[in-house]
Amino acid sequence: MEMVLVMLFYTLLSRIGSSSWQMQRQIQKLTRHRLETCSFMAHREQGKQWAARELARKSGLDYALMTGGDVAPLGSQAVTKIHQLFDWAKKSNRGLLLFIDEADAFLCERNKTYMSEAQRSALNALLFRTGDQSKDIVLALATNRPGDLDSAVSDRIDEVLEFPLPGEDERFKLLKLYLDKYIAQTGARKPGLFSSLFKKQQKKIEIKGLNDDIIKEAAAKTEGFSGREIAKLMASVQAAVYGSEDCALDPNLFREVVDYKVAEHEQRKKLALAEA
């Protein structure tokens, strides 16, 4: 079974900006031919599932999702479940794209001392089912530790696509996107009758003097941020606004939160380097 590997190191796979356009071009290129197997690998998780869904949709395949961590709790039943999954895929008239997130938790090197016999057997079962050419299933793998994958899994990889972190323009658009989601639209939607009985209505946030120049300034400061980190940054802005007296967002508060999250990001990088 041939494999297509889509590597998404520190990935942004949003539907905006040039990164998205490039990714869609790559997906269209890959899906000109019926894929037997596909694999995704990434440090950051933002957008991988969307990419797999796009690949499945453009290939005309059905779509299923599991994580590598789902295998270990199955114990001795893991092998049976793997075979059942592939048998189920064969029943689909259109074929199936199986997306395995955090694949290194399942498909790591078989000589690892901490790997249980049940996990090793499950990996062998998957390798057995992917050893021959098949048009029934596309296997999409996502991992932030590609070097940990078993060599037999790596040998099935045919093509690599790499998507970088969002550039400054993409970060600007993401900041605008999440500003609208977490700030501008907060409190604007009226809850349904049932929700209003049990949930307190969020206050509407007032935005004072926050213009595109200030957001561009934040986009420049957040170099190295993933899409997920930018989303968390804007969620922190929302929390800071609700912690203020007047429930308003002004440039000073926005810059304060951005600077804090940038410092936090740099600290995490230092800790990661120290551990390495």
Image (spheres, rainbow, N blue to C red):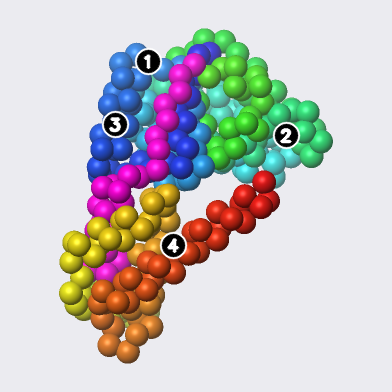
- Residue drawn where x is 25% and y is 44% of the image: 16
| Neighbour tally class for label 1: few under 14, some 14-19, many 20 plus, Cα within 10 Å | some
Q: Is residue 196 above or below residue 46?
A: below
Q: Earlier in the sequence, mark 2 or mark 4?
A: 2
- The kind of secondary structure element at disc 2 is helix
Q: Nearer the viewer, mark 2 or mark 4?
A: 4
The dot on residue 34 is 1
- Residue drawn where x is 41% and y is 17% of the image: 35
Measured as percent of width and height from the top left, residue 231 is found at 37, 58
Q: CA distance from mark 4 to mark 3?
A: 27 Å
Is 172 contained in the magenta span? yes
- The kind of secondary structure element at disc 1 is loop
Q: Earlier in the sequence, mark 3 or mark 1?
A: 3
The dot on residue 244 is none
Residue 226 visible? The answer is yes
Task: Residue under label 2, please give it.
Answer: 119
- In the image, the segment drawn in magenta is 158-184
Chief secondary structure of the magenta portion: helix
Q: Residue 114, located in which quarter of the rendered image?
A: top right
Is 174 contained in the magenta span? yes
Q: Is residue 7 above or below residue 272?
A: above
Q: CA distance from mark 2 to mark 1?
A: 30 Å
Q: Amino acid at mark 3?
A: Gln
Q: CA distance from mark 4 to mark 1?
A: 43 Å
Q: CA distance from mark 3 to mark 2?
A: 37 Å
Residue 88 versus residue 179: which sits nearer the camera? 179
- The kind of secondary structure element at disc 4 is helix
Q: Earlier in the sequence, mark 4 or mark 3?
A: 3
Measured as percent of width and height from the top left, residue 208 is found at 19, 77
